[in-house]
Amino acid sequence: MSGVDATPGPRTTVLVVDDHPLVRGGLGTLLSSTADLVVVGEAGNGLDAVRLAAELRPQVILMDLSMPILDGVEATRQILEQQPEARIVVLTSLHDRVRVHEALGAGAIGYLLKDAEAEVLLAAIRSAALGHSPLDPRVAAALLPGALVAPPDAAGLARTSPLSARESEVLQLITSGLSNKQIGQQLGIAERTVKAHVGSIFRHLRVADRTSAAMWARDHDF
């Protein structure tokens, strides 16, 4: 007998969210063909996604955007308010700039298009599970600085920022040295929501900690 342990390692759990049964079925078949990924649930709308995410606690969530009852952006936001550690990867046919920023601003860690090759999708799920941000090259340009316009500065001049308006508020409070709890009290939002915004800020700015985020804000006259 060989001395090699053939016991499979831990599998990454995935929740598939899409309002088309054929898409959900196809993704289930694809993931079931791997040894390290497993679909633990399916949802046909954003409301069910929020419920199942809380119940199943999947490591990665594949999230469509255009769905009935509750769309993917709002579902992403609500899930991350409850589970800041969840890794949500948008899988959609939409790649206009506004939708990309809405999804990533809500906290999605990645953004893929539905015509992606199977190998690319599987690699993206594995990458997201490790905390990386898989992005389709066709939508990556939407993340370049200047893609979004932030609120005007004191002089009334428009300035550019890769952050949403709420993330901009959180970043300004980070630079003031406030903790997540203090930021939540200042803005009237839950501490876990602040944590989700902070994580999204780090991803957008490509920084790893609060100090680096504050330095980015200083360097960009934020």
Image (cartoon, rainbow, N blue to C red):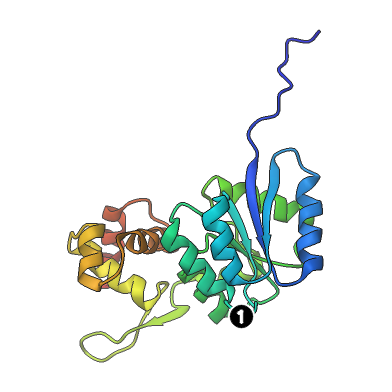
Residue at horizontal 39 percent and vertical 60 percent from the top: 196
Q: Position of residue 150 (x, y in %)?
A: 36, 81
Q: Residues within 10 Å of mark 1 (few under 14, many from 20)?
A: few
Q: Quadrant of residue 22?
A: bottom right
Residue 8 visible in the current orientation: yes
Q: Position of residue 190 (x, y in %)?
A: 31, 64
Image mark count: 1
Q: Amino acid at mark 1?
A: Asp
**Which of the two residues, 154 or 19, is positioned nearer the viewer here?**
19
Q: Which residue is mark 1?
A: 96
Q: Quadrant of the C terminus?
A: bottom left
Residue 142 visible in the current orientation: no
**Which of the two residues, 27 or 160, is positioned nearer the viewer here?**
27
Q: Position of residue 141 (x, y in %)?
A: 56, 71
Q: Is 146 left, or right, of 44 in this rendering?
A: left
Q: Is 68 left, or right, of 204 in this rendering?
A: right
Residue at horizontal 46 percent and vertical 71 percent from the top: 105
